Image (cartoon, helix red, strand yellow):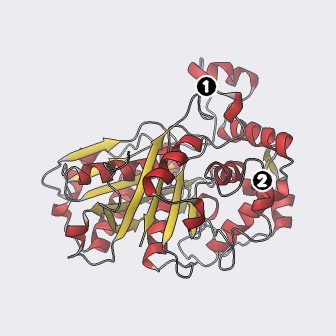
Amino acid sequence: MTDWLPRDKVCIVGIGESVYYRWGKSPDSEFKLALQAITAAIDDAGLRVEDIDGFCAFANDRNEPILLASALGVSRIRFTNMFWGGGGGGGSGAVMNAVLALATGSANYVVAYRGLAQGQFGRIGQSRAGGAVDGQAAFAAPFGLMVPAQNYALRIRRHMHLYGTTSRHLGAISVACYKHAQRNPRAVMYGRPITIEDHQNSRIIADPFHLYDCCQENDGAAAVVLTTPERARDLKQRPVYVRAASQGTGFRPAGGAHNIDNYATAGFVEVAKDLWERADLTPKDVDVAQIYENFTGQTLMSIEDHGFCKRGEGGPFVEGGRLEWPNGELPINTSGGNLAEAYIHGFELVNEAVRQMRGTSTCQVEGAEVCLVASGPGASPFSDMIVRR
């Protein structure tokens, strides 16, 4: 039964972001970047700061709601929430938690956000020396498996072994994202297009990942404001409805204690099943998708997990410009995504989904009515959402 689910009962009414910088280049602190994104989203919605009464974040965001509220001048907080986990798997989940708060009357206007300044607090993709390790790292770090690129490289290498996936297949994803970034002046990689030859000739980071298979390291912040359709009628922007969302994981997800049966996946299988059921939609209904790219191999496996093609067919599926605007059958990451716009733990993908539904993207998909956002492959727990016009 899905009658209880808040389908189309909450909408996104404002989006905002800071300037996106290469890591270490921001003149502002992470906290100030978050404030910039949140105030921009509030202004975009046509609201006052005083209207905000809820805050949702993810990935252990350091920008605490009580401090944000004090700096913004928010007089009353009625709801706060942090999606569990330190990776990008909570991007859609933070929005989902805001949806649940609004649908139950726990708040009236909720901000979901992510602030990230890798120049200030350290690079996520870099290992750090220490005298001891515990947990999962205790079984990996002593053998040199220390950074995300290495961990995720093993999984796509397994996919290559099983299904014949190639580096050029991964390159097709990079080329699409970089192509889209060339139309987006906000993108850090704006003005820097690449070809498949550029991808193949770039240096290896962790075999089979080349440089252009890896997400950026950035400083920046992004935010959205959500409310109910009734309140949205009086606001500035056309509301974008959250059709459905899902979060969680299956047994022994790819991001934790490994299960050999799902090792060559992005971990979305169970979450995707829930999403399609809750939305009463299928992959064929999706016009455009924002699919998190920590690494291109995980994006390819995410496409399979969500049913756009069968398991093992992701390589051939991404070929031939299928992922590229304006003529591809499934345009993805139309602002450039983590690879070429900015890596804000994937929350910039949520903003781009809203732009697509408003009709304001720099790579606008003609007639787009349904957009998928898939957050954080391999970083459990996972989350998904679908937004619509």
Tell me: 42 left or right of 246: left
State the residue lying farthest toward the front. Answer: 1
Element carrying mark 2: loop
Q: Are marks 1 and 2 in contact (CB under 8 Å)?
A: no
Figure quadrant of residue 309: bottom right
Q: Hey, what amino acid is under mark 1?
A: Ala
Residue 241 versus residue 261 in the image, above or below: below
Disc 2 packing (10 Å; few <14; some 14–19; many ≥20): some
Q: Is residue 297 or residue 62 the one in the foreground?
A: 297
**Quadrant containing the C terminus in the rendered view:** bottom left
Figure quadrant of residue 111: bottom left
Q: Which mark is residue 313?
A: 2
Q: Which residue is mark 1?
A: 257
Q: Is residue 191 or residue 169 the one in the foreground?
A: 169
Q: Hey, what amino acid is under mark 2?
A: Glu
Please provide percent x and percent y for residue 252: 59, 28
Please provide percent x and percent y for residue 2: 37, 48
